[in-house]
Image (cartoon, grey):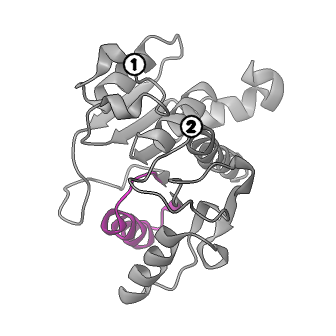
Amino acid sequence: MNERLIGLIDTKKLSKFNILLVGVGGVGSACFEVLIRSGIKNITIVDFDTYEESNLNRQLHSNLNVIGKKKIDVLKNFANTLPLDIKVNSVDVFLDSSSNLNFNKYDYIIDACDTIEAKVYLVKKALELNKKIISSMGVGNRINPHDLGVFKLSKTSNDPLAKKFKLALKKEGITKDVIVVASNELPIKKTPVSSYIGVSLVSGVLLADYVIKDLLNEN
């Protein structure tokens, strides 16, 4: 089906790229789905978390049968049920600056994780190794997926996570304007923070779509 839309050459082109996806929760699981069903054949997923009942409202691949199981294992097993010849490498780690991960083989880094430290670390590695990167910003306590979009980090607004990300990058002396998926919607002031699948899903779709289109535009 993808060949009918983008042609055989671009379909084969996508199959050659190697993607690193960090975080496979509400946003990351949707991103993973779009990537593997669009022709990406080589992907490494990084996450340390297990499924909980609180994930059932928004995280793809979550159900009562996988509660307590590692998210990376569930996604890898799911990909193996598809007749798409996908190579999924799973890394069970809480990513931070001390993580021993080889970034050299990846063509694109997708940041769908939650912590500022990990986000800054990924940007630093991308700059160091001249890798492309896109990061997801906050989706919690938001209910309008129409306010999501792909922006430069400097153009984001109404996003506390993006603000912290900017400050953390500045502290590290990083001036590059990172590409992000973010919402301009003001978060609802409620605790604990909750997430709506409409926003999480669209955020993940936008991440994957941007990466796919960017890769296809490469010479």
| Element at label 1 | loop
Taking 119 as reference, is 145 above or below it? above
The kind of residue on which mark 2 rests is Ile
Label placed on residue 197: 2
Q: Residues within 10 Å of mark 2 (few under 14, many from 20)?
A: many
177 is within the stretch colored magenta: no
Q: Left or right? Give the position of 54 relative to 212.
A: left
Position of residue 117 measured from the top left corner of the image (x, y, whole percent):
31, 68
Q: Residues within 10 Å of mark 1 (few under 14, many from 20)?
A: some
Residue at x 26%, y 39% (from the top left corner)? 49
Q: Left or right? Give the position of 110 relative to 76.
A: right
Q: Nearer the viewer, residue 111 or 102?
A: 111
Q: Earlier in the sequence, mark 1 or mark 2?
A: 1
Task: Return the residue found at the far front.
Answer: 190
Residue at x 60%, y 43% (from the top left corner)? 208
Compute the Cα span from label 1 to label 2: 14 Å
Q: Are marks 1 and 2 in contact (CB under 8 Å)?
A: no
| Element at label 2 | helix
Q: Nearer the viewer, residue 6 or 70?
A: 70
Judging by the rendered image, the residue that carries numbered circle 1 is 63
132 is within the stretch colored magenta: yes
Taking 199 as reference, is 157 above or below it? below
